[in-house]
Amino acid sequence: MSVEPRPPHPHHPHHPDHAHHLEHAEHAAASVRDASPATPAAPVSPVSPVSPVSPAGPPDPDAMLEDLRELVLCESFSADHAAVAASAGVVAGQGHDRLGARPETIVVDGVTHLRWTFGTPRVLLLGHHDTVWPVGTLRTHPWSVTGGIARGPGVFDMKAGLVQMFHALALLPSLDGVCVLVTGDEEVGSPSSRALVEESARACAATFVLEGSADGGALKIARKGTSMYEVVVHGRGAHAGLAPEKGANAGVELAHQILAVAGIADRVNAAPPGTATGPASATGPAWADGPGTADGLGPVTVTPTLLSGGTTTNTVPALARLAVDVRVPTLDAQRRVDELMRALRPHVPGTRLEVLGGPNRPPLEHASSAGLFDLARGVAAGAGLAPLSGVGVGGASDGNFTAGAGCPTLDGLGAVGGGAHADDEHVIVAEMPLRARLLAGLVAAVLR
């Protein structure tokens, strides 16, 4: 890991065109501030409307759109470390322009991450600047703004969120207590940034994640945890025509394992009702991917995905592999799935199994977001913004790590739009200044 020394950060960056004072949100914010950073915030009672944000001038939509254009035109495919480094330079420049400070540049395993720290951090703002789109995608998915809709690779996931974050922070009279972390490998599971994310979150009372919103602008108040496995079957090769009996068919064994793996979710979900791994009444947050079960979240899913095996059509396969995608609503369910994956045993004589991988991201459970979501609803009401809704989603983010580290976490505060990782990725431009005002109010409320 290499770290570029961080210059001293001003505690009161001056932005005369945006500076303002956010009115008090004492009762709502106290429930979040007083929560121990080592313990997820307990749900709090609904808050009364918070005094509105009252800047000298609202975020400049034209400036936000120009910043978004600049970020989208700098492609940042996760696997292309040079492209990610170039993107980090653009993000750092925008952050400097809006915050009045240059970031700490942290390179881990060739991946470039950025961190701004102002005083003693109490609030973490978290995002990533890498995308799933290979360099050159702009030729087929060009930057465009038509009818108030912005399009381009990474525009929704999550470059608009970064723009909103910088413009929101520029509205605050002081950044003392704020930490901003922008990572460069979230889309591939955050292998080089996880430690940075968890380290940054442990010191804070709240984390706000700038991933795109759910449908209709809903905030993400719960996320399933993820586990990733590879089941490797070792067999014994032989000539399929002359002496197949001398082989141990890894492909046949893989077929047994596919069926065994596919049955794990049913075993976990069939635990007694009301347990951490079993079904319960559909209470709590709405679940975006289907009916609710444990704590109002969706069921455990264990999905065999990528398959491979064999060498030639006339050879008994000596090796076969199976990738497995796991999504879980609770830590207990994640542990139970891991136990069952480790308990897999071979059926075909002469074969043996290796089970590689394991839990990747812990779940972001509703208890981690409840207090902050109540605060966000109060801030939105006080600022005259539309009422907020919250949902759980099956996809994971770095917010799973911050919640797992014990920091209350609210996700989905980024762009309103849709089409993440898809050809129709887009952002509703008119929502960007509104989301920036919401975020500014949230940060100010927690820091008071």
Image (tube, grey):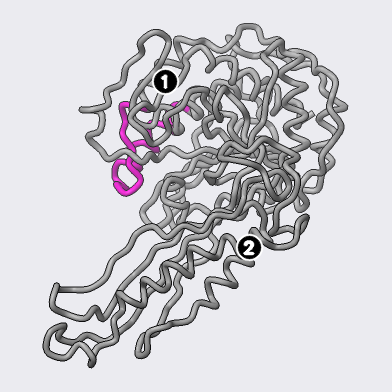
Query: Label 1: which residue?
Result: 67
Is residue 384 visible in this depiction of the protein?
A: yes
Q: Write the residue at 53% across / 17% down.
A: 432
Pick whichever, 328 or 78, lies toward us: 328
**Residue 421 painted magenta:** no
Residue 90 highlighted magenta (yes or no): yes
Where 215 sits versus 18, above or below?
below
Q: Looking at the image, which residue is at 59% across and 15% down?
A: 434
Name the element at disc 2: helix
Which three-letter amino acid code belongs to the residue tagged 2? Val
**Viewer-nearest of labels 1 and 2?**
2
What segment carries the magenta color?
Answer: 72-94
Q: Quadrant of the N terminus?
A: bottom left
Q: Where is residue 297 in the image (x, y as percent from the top left)?
A: 66, 45
Identified at 32% across, 63% down, the residue is 307
- Amino acid identity at mark 1: Asp
* Crowd class of label 1 (few under 14; some 14 to 19; many from 20; radius 10 Å): many
